Amino acid sequence: MKVVILPGDGIGPEVCETAVTVLRAACASSNIALDTEEHAFGGAAIDQYGDPLPPATLEACLGADAVLLGAVGGPRYDEAAKKGAPRPEAGLLALRREMGLFANLRPSRLFEGLEEASPLRKSVVADTDILVVRELTGGLYFGEREEGSDRALDRLPYSREEVERVARTAFEAARGRKGLLTSVDKANVLATSRLWRGVVEDVHKSYPDVRLEHVLVDAMAMHLVTHPSRFDVVVTENLFGDILSDELSAVVGSIGLAPSASLGEAGKPGLYEPIHGSAPDIAGLGIANPIGAILSAAMLLRHSAGEETAAASIEAAVAWCLADGLRTHDLGGSASTKDALDAVLSAL
Ligand code: NAI
Ligand code: MG
C-alpha cells in the first residue's frame, strides 16, 4: 500500500508523524506492506515553492492508494495573503477537487470514560454515535467568488449529480448502521436546499430500508446539543457539514479526537485527515492531541486498503487508552503528544 504523507503546518507535522508511527505498527502486525512518501503541502509548500499544492505533490497524491494529511494554515500565511500571496487553504481545496473527493465522512462517538469531557450532561450525551457525511467539492467553497472591501460575493451552486452521489454514500452508510438518515438543509430559504431535498428524496427510492428525515440546519444545530443520541447518519452540504461536525466534535469531547475520510469514486485514492486545523496556539509545544490523526489512519486502512481488522485494532487501542484515563490538555489532562503515542502503541 502506497501512502502519501502531507504533514502541512502548525500541529499538522506533530499529529501526522504520530499517526504514521501507529499506522506502521498496525501494518507490521497485520503483514501489510506499507510504503510511505512525504511531500510538501500547504504553508510549508508555499515557503519552499511558492505554491500550496506543487505539481509533484499533486502527482504523488493521484498515484497513491491513499493520502494522510495533518493540517494547513496559520496567521503568518493569513498576513501574507492580504498582500496577494497564495493561501495554504487554497491548496487543500484544490487537492480535494483534483482528487474528486466529494464525500467527507466524519464520525463522532462518545468514547467510554469521556462523559466528563463533554460540555453536555451525561444523560444527554450518552450513546451519541453519529456519522456526518459532508459534501466536499461543491457549494460555497467552490462557487464563484468576488473579493472586495465594499462588496463581496460567494456563490452556492449544486447540481443534481453532485447531490445524488453524496446522498448515495450516505444511504449506503446508514444501511450499514442503525438505518436512519437525517438530511440537513435550509429548504425554507435556499434554492439549492430545495434541489438538495428533492434529489435526496429521489435517491431514497433505491433505499426503502433506510428511514429518511429532513431537518433545517438551524434546528439541527440545536438538536445536536439537546438530543445528539437520536441521530445516526447525517448528510449535508459543504458549509453546513463543516460547521455541524465541529460542533459535534466538541459535544463528544474535543475536536482533537475527530478523524475524517474524504472519498471519491470507488477505486480512487482517499484522503484522511483529522478535522481540526493547524492550531497555531499550541503548535510546537508537543501537547497536541494526536487521536484525531490516529483514527484517520484507521479509516485509511478501512476505506482505502480494505483492512478492517487492522483498522478496528487501532480504534480499539484508542478506546482502551481513553477508558484507561489518557487525557491530553484539550481533554483537561496533562498527557503530551508523545505520551499519547506511547499509550496507543502499547495498547495496540
Ligand atoms: P483549529 O482547529 O486549528 O483550532 C481550534 C482550537 O482547537 C484551538 O484552540 C486549538 O488549540 C484546539 N485544537 C485543535 N486541534 C487540536 C488538537 N489536535 N489537540 C489539542 N487542541 C486542538 O482551528 P482555528 O484555530 O480556527 O484555525 C487555525 C488554522 O487552521 C487557520 O489557519 C485555519 O485556516 C486552519 N484550518 C485548517 C484546516 C485543515 O487543514 N483541514 C481545518 C480548519 C482550520
Ligand atoms: Mg472545520
Image (tube, grey):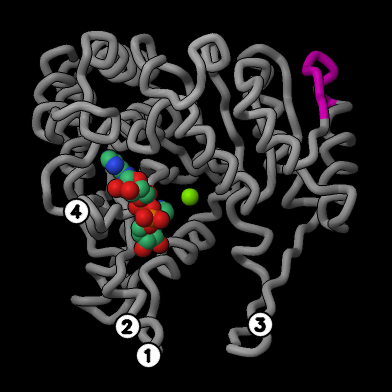
Sequence-first disc among 4 and 1: 1
User: Does residue 4 appear to the left or right of 91 in the view shown?
Assistant: left
Q: Residue at x 57, y 27 (%)?
A: 131
Report which residue position mark 3 lands on: 152
Q: Is residue 9 above or below residue 196?
A: below
Pointer 1 and pointer 2: residues touching (CB < 8 Å)? yes
Q: Position of residue 56 (x, y in %)?
A: 29, 68
User: Does residue 41 appear to the left or right of 213 in the view shown?
Assistant: left
Report which residue position mark 4 lands on: 283
Q: Residue at x 34, y 20 (%)?
A: 311
Q: Nearer the viewer, residue 9 or 94?
A: 9
Q: Quadrant of the N terminus?
A: top left
Disc 2 marks a residue whose amino acid type is Ala
Q: Residue at x 38, y 33 (%)?
A: 254
Report which residue position mark 2 lands on: 80
Secondary structure beneath dot 3 equals loop
Pointer 2 and pointer 3: residues touching (CB < 8 Å)? no
Disc 1 marks a residue whose amino acid type is Lys
Report which residue position mark 1 lands on: 83
Sequence-first disc among 4 and 3: 3
Q: Position of residue 207 (x, y in %)?
A: 80, 22
Q: Is residue 198 above or below residue 96?
A: above
Local crowd at mark 4 within 10 Å, few (<14), some, or many (≥20)?
Answer: some
Q: Is residue 14 above or below residue 123?
A: below
Q: Which portion, as a residue range, is magenta?
A: 206-213
Marks 4 and 3, how far apart at CA: 32 Å
Q: Is residue 210 magenta?
A: yes
